[in-house]
Image (cartoon, rainbow, N blue to C red):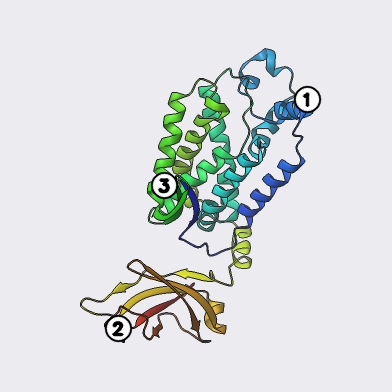
Amino acid sequence: MIPIRDTIQSRNYPVVNMTLIAINVAVFFLQPTHGTEAQNFIITYGLIPARFTVDAIAQHFTFGQQIFSLVSFMFLHGGFLHLLGNMWFLYIFGDNVEDTLGPVRYLAFYLICGWASALIHVLFNIQSQVPVIGASGAIAGVMGAYLILYPRSRVLTLIPIIIIPYFIEIPAAFFLVIWFLIQFISATMSGPAGGAGIAWWAHVGGFVSGIGLVFLFRYLPRIGVSDILNRTTVKQRSPRLHVVKPAPRTDGYDLYGNIEITSREAERGTQKIVNLPLGFQKRMFRVTIPPGTRDGVTLRLAGLGAKISEQERGDAYLRVAVRGE
């Protein structure tokens, strides 16, 4: 299953989440990729359990190198596909978690989940000399938090059936639980150092720590920096494309749905592309929202309802929700 996007739009621009993605990408293109230099780089800045548990190995590293590796391993990746997969999951799920926690708490949450995933990996691979790199553990924590914060969200998912791509919206809770079960089963079936070079227990530890920590972080007090960033990063526009799930009134041909816009769009007016599915049909049309639209106003779209006869259709009604009101 390949997630394409979730159905909940963040209210603020995810400045910390995008910064984390940018740092990971920058480090990937700066780190050496071939030969002895690359190997030494990974050994120095990756997470190696034996560096902390075997004295004969630990003495080859300074105290600063040991401490720094607990952070640096989260920003290294073994290949482009490794980087792409991690950053894509972070992009999909991270913005909403940052929206709820605020930028400062989200950054602390992300790093602590990464450390927790490292601790779990070390405990299950106590004397392993295999370096572990990647943001997977921290991102797994973000996914665990998303499961708690947005259990009713849905994820547009690509399911390849042989060579035919099949797109379906599935509950985010189902997607995340299935993902976790795959990680857990793989961890229990892999060898001590992890099968195929994948730190399965780090994924499991990160996900579980994210579920536990999000309850704590939600109730930590916000600091002034978060409030300033939230005020300056509020999104001025809602997505251009809106998928409306219409509900027909009993024994009628009219359809009823909702569309959310920002207060700036309500004030100045805007145009949206609306996807209005009806049975197996998916119709796309442009909706003009006039300037000065208030929260709760209903727009009538004549002739876009259910089919009454060959020449006649019902109407569609969109209730406008103005974000922040």
Q: Residue at position x 39%, y 49% from top?
A: 173
Residue lying furthest left: 251
Residue 155 horizontal/vertical position (percent): 44, 54
Q: Can residue 221 be seen at all in this image of the molecule?
A: no
Between the residue at mark 1 and the residue at mark 3, the CA separation in whole angstroms equals 40 Å
| Mark 3: amino acid | Phe
In this rendering, the answer to whether 313 lies above or below 242 is below
Give how far apart the Cα atoms at labels 2 and 1 are. Answer: 73 Å
Front residue of 221/180: it is: 180
Circle 2: element type:
loop
Res 310 label: 2
What is the three-letter code of the residue carrying label 2? Glu
Q: Which residue is mark 1?
A: 36
Label 2: how many residues lie within 10 Å, few (<14), some (14-19) or many (20+)? few
Residue 224: x and y, percent?
61, 59
Say which residue label 3 marks.
175
Which of the marked residues, 1 or 3, is nearer the chain's N terminus?
1
Q: Who's the residue at 51% across and 86% down the image? A: 290
Residue 253 appears anywhere in the view: yes
User: Tags 2 and 1 in contact by the CB under 8 Å rule?
Assistant: no
User: Is residue 43 left or right of 199 when viewed as pictured?
Assistant: right
Q: CA distance from mark 2 to mark 3?
A: 41 Å
Question: Tag 1 or tag 2, which sits nearer the N-term?
Answer: 1
In the figure, residue 212 lies in which quadrant?
top left
Q: Is the C-beta separation of discs 1 and 3 under 8 Å? A: no
Please, what secondary structure does the residue beneath circle 3 have? helix
Image depth: mark 2 or mark 1 in front: 2
Q: Position of residue 88 (x, y in %)?
A: 57, 49
Q: The residue under label 1 is which amino acid type?
A: Thr
Q: Position of residue 266 (x, y in %)?
A: 52, 81
- Secondary structure, mark 1, is helix
